[in-house]
Amino acid sequence: MTLDEARAAIVKTLQKVQDVSGLPCPVLTGVDVPRRVLEKFDSTVWPVATSWIAKELGVKIDNNVHVFGGKNGGPLLTINQSANLICAHVAAQTFAMAAE
């Protein structure tokens, strides 16, 4: 999986979340922080969005991976940062499976 594929899956999923919710979705770029640019996109929706991203990419994203940031009051992530996080997580999973 490439960074561009991860970013595209995130954007596609965010658009889907907003569409299903009947809410508008602006044109999203990698520097956007979803929580700040999407109406009603908050931590109650993030687990569903994360599972949809995983399904789109055909990967498993563990529950302890906070794709959109904000864990324990930490910073919210941009789409680019989220894509990097997903790629790093999948690479770590792949490495762990290879080591077994």
Image: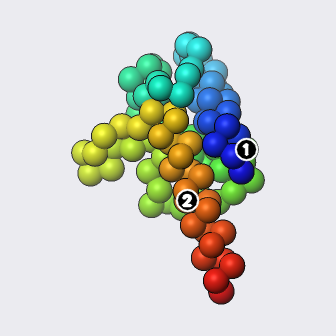
**Quadrant housing the C terminus:** bottom right
Which residue type does callout 2 highlight?
His
| Side of 36 relative to 4 (left or right) | left
Q: Which residue is mark 2?
A: 89
| Side of 63 relative to 35 (left or right) | right
The image shows residue 24 at horizontal and vertical percentages of: 56, 13
Residue lying at the far left of the rendered structure: 73
Q: Is residue 13 above or below residue 23?
A: below
The image shows residue 7 at horizontal and vertical percentages of: 62, 36
The image shows residue 58 at horizontal and vertical percentages of: 74, 53
**What is the C-alpha distance between the residues marked 2 and 1?**
16 Å
For the point 62% across and 60% down, which residue is it? 90
Whether tag 2 and tag 1 are in contact, CB under 8 A, the answer is no
Q: Is residue 21 above or below residue 62?
A: above
Q: Is residue 27 above or below residue 61?
A: above
Q: Which residue is mark 1?
A: 56
Please state which of residues 67 and 47 is positioned toward the viewer in this rendering. Answer: 67
Which residue type does callout 1 highlight?
Glu
For the point 64% across and 43% down, which residue is it? 3
Write down the quadrant of residue 33 in the picture.
Answer: top left
- Check the image and tell me how it is coloured: rainbow
Whichever of callouts 2 and 1 sits on the residue coming sooner in the sequence is: 1
For the point 55% across and 59% down, which residue is it? 89
Give the secondary structure at mark 1.
helix
Q: Residues within 10 Å of mark 2 (few under 14, many from 20)?
A: some
Whether residue 68 can be seen here: yes
